[in-house]
Image (spheres, helix red, strand yellow):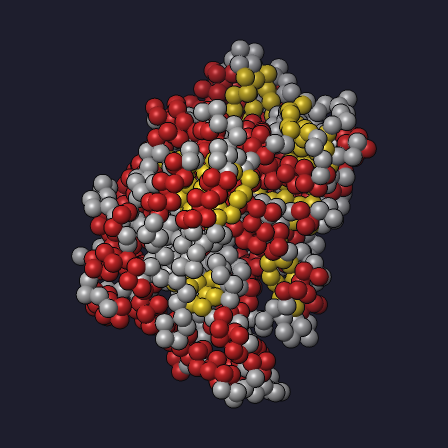
Amino acid sequence: MTSFADRHVGPDDDAISTMLHAVGYASLEALIDDAVPESIRQDDILVLPEALTEAGALTKLERFANANVQAAQMIGQGYYDTVTPAAIRRGILTNPAWYSAYTPYQAEISQGRLEALLNFQTMVSDLTALPVANASLLDESTAVSEAVLLMARATAGAGTVVLDAECFPQTLEVVLAQCEAVGVAARVETIDEGWTPTADVVGVVIQNPGMSGVLRDLGPHIEATHSAGALVTIACDLLSLTIVTPPGEVGADIAVGSAQRFGVPLFYGGPHAAFIAVRAGLERQMPGRIIGVSIDAEGKPAYRLALQTREQHIRRDKATSNICTAQSLLAVVASMYAVYHGPNGLRDIALQIHSRAVTLSDALAAMGHEPMHEAFFDTLILHVPGGADSVVARAAAAGINIRKVDDDRVAIACDEKTELATLDTLVEAIIATKRHPVYTAPRVAIPRAMRRTSEYLTHPVFNTHHSEASLTRYMRRLGDRDLALDRTMIPLGSCTMKLNAAAELEPILWPGFANIHPFAPSEQTAGYRHMIEQLEDWLAEITGYAAVSVQPNAGSRGEYAGLLAIRNYHLSQNQTGRDICLIPASAHGTNAASAVLAGMRVVVVATNDSGEIDLPDLRAKLVKHAGAVAAIMITYPSTHGVYEAHVGEVCAAVHEAGAQVYIDGANLNALVGLAKPGHFGGDVSHLNLHKTFAIPHGGGGPGVGPVAVAEHLVPFLPRVRQGIQRPRDLMREGAAVSGAPYGSAGILPIAWAYIAMLGPDGLQHATQVAVLAANYVAARLRDYFPVLYSGANGLVAHECILDLRELTKATGITAEDVAKRLIDYGLHAPTMSWPVAGTLMVEPTESEDIAELDRFIDAMIAIRAEIAAVERGEIEASASALRHAPHTAESVIADTWDHAYSRESAAFPVQALRRDKYFPPVRRIDNAYGDRHLVCSCPPPEAFED
């Protein structure tokens, strides 16, 4: 019977033999023996359960899901049950055209998801009444943290940031840890009616509605704060802004929050898209991605990522944030929810939620239980002197989860799913008698001065697609504009765009996984916690570390968590002067940005001509900064696609200097089953489950970035705030790095299924084939494009760098020209000009069969022939198809064709494209124009007219 490994790994045995022959080896084992240094190899097989079939894995996951207790989730605290429209579930969440796409750095083949993300920005901007929003952030807690750092940067002062005592407790924990790390003074204050900022304040964060549900008129607080020269951030409920005066209209500088209520399931805490919106003048200080509108080569509107010079992949340690993966798929879901419901539908949902809360409040008040606040949106605080535990227990027994505030108070939050029958049951649980509540006529518990009167979501996109047929066609139309894994391989170096198997994804929308609140009682979440325990143990075995935390909800947060663990370890050893992080010149940009967020200074270590860490320079830096080095961050295999033979010497030198070794797990796909970072010198690593372990990239998220540590760092892992997973968690007192205890828990079943279905042998085989695929590409293309770096025996690891620099000098044809021309061949470009400018980095992964690998190789050979024509002087670079790529269908059938090459060569450069051709929706985009003319919301329809 065919195993899952046979489905996941693209090349079969015959193809593997053909590929090995091209590389010059007789077996996979011989290739790996020559490619991977003996000094790091593990001899024993991974100690993991034997592979399950797809049916067997789904059966086990079903047991986990069924072990979670489903209840009416009225806990609130930033997480609310919602209805995901079936059309969006099918059209986005279970559609590989959407979930298997990469971050839209290649904008010409990403116009569909860029439009959806621009809709998200427009939605956030309209609802917050602030002109510039991003797309998007990781969760509300980290969004508040980003806003605090933004205020500190923008004011350039050494003052204090005040955090509202009404902020959610998980937010306070995340933000206070971040502020402590970077040296931003922060304190929590009660912002009541008479509050005014002191002279040292540079920024204030106010939660509205507050954690207690209270709605406050913030105008006086904001005016007083601005008078003191400080900025104001409002953490808000996005859905409430359809009926509550938005932050921008009361003078806020920044608004942040979560878009989870817009159709995204609870998922036991994530993934959910957060947002940030700012007033004019702060946009260049914003974290994360901004979608902008530019023009293409024909002057037509086109979408792109704007102001990228703020971001980590360019500015490194000077970046506004370390964020990379950013919950894009969930932002798309939220935007489609707004498109589907429109402004009136959203307002109706908000009013229904508010009406349920008011109905409950009035019924309880009539029975002698007066709620705490008169003005609220969806959440009530109820006084139950001495009875909180018994009320919460009675409600849980009746199938309703509410929140204990303290011994005398409980909190109840209504949501889109709250029915009157639920309120009946809840009232009986609270008053402990079978008494039917009397509901009064609906009223509005929002003072008139706080009610929204302005319009929002007026763009046609939010007022057109309200039937399922219309929405379905709109989602299909956008999806068809993009290239994702359902159409082509995505050979992006350092990104590991492997198969996201349908069986792995199927369980995440099961109610037993999707409908669980992150702060549900631990006795209701046994299935989730058991699965997470297994996954963490498996990841620890795969990496060779003592323990793993899955709390980081992106690779960037994993880096931050790992570096915080190192920092706090040194502090525990009274090594207070260790604040330098050594980072190789070739490192990922997130490394430097994460080091700064963890309160460290960055010192760059050189790389040598072979692309490896320069050992003499490393030793010199360790001597120069003796006693001050906290860690080195290295990627293994290196970002140059090579297994560095002297990695053991690097680790030994750093340890001898009293520092720790952080091994970035971005390239773990070249190690699984072959070598363990925790065994060849690593003290800590983060992993990317959305790379190595098959969670889909989603066009820029979701991701999970577990952090794995050696025994001495276990106490500094992120702690789980509510519910202890197992006894060893009692040791974990590190800082929280995301709002939910287990981060993006809702997508962890994907990685669990991937490991369970491959088993130890399948995992190792996948790694071997990934290495073979990269070497096959390198061997076949080496005569056309030099392979910049190789290791022992001329081999690469799981990716290779094709060097175009000499060709560019000779012809003027650039790496960008080749990347855009690949679009005409129906292919996604490799990673462009990173880690070396003027190159292309190719990572084919183990999932691509030999036919797809050959399609890419043949396209590159054909492009090399096009470059040769420029070399021979047959055509100028400026006149070539390479320079004018990509070509749209409209451009090749235009009445006028004034190019020096044929229409046929533009559209169909190889014969196979006549059978199956992807045409991009736009020509090459003018990036500079987009940054000079920044537009970050939906352009009017007439902008697309001829």
Say left or right for 755 vs 152: left
Counting from the top left corner in percent of width and height, residue 807 is at 49, 75
Q: Residue placed at 20% from the left, 46% from the top? A: 43
Q: Nearer the viewer, residue 838 or 295?
A: 838
Q: Where is 519 relative to 789, above or below?
A: above
Residue 553 appearing in the image = no
Counting from the top left corner in percent of width and height, residue 442 is at 66, 32
How many numbered badges does the structure rendering display?
0
Q: Nearer the viewer, residue 777 or 133?
A: 777
Q: Quadrant of residue 35?
A: bottom left
Counting from the top left corner in percent of width and height, residue 40 is at 28, 47
Counting from the top left corner in percent of width and height, residue 808 is at 52, 74
Q: Residue placed at 60% from the left, 48% from the top? A: 319
Say left or right for 336 vs 133: left
Say left or right for 665 vs 111: left
Q: Where is 141 relative to 440, above or below?
A: below
Residue at the limit of the structure toward the right, as seen here: 227
Q: Nearer the viewer, residue 126 or 818?
A: 818
Q: Where is 243 relative to 344, above or below?
A: above
Say left or right for 562 vs 437: left
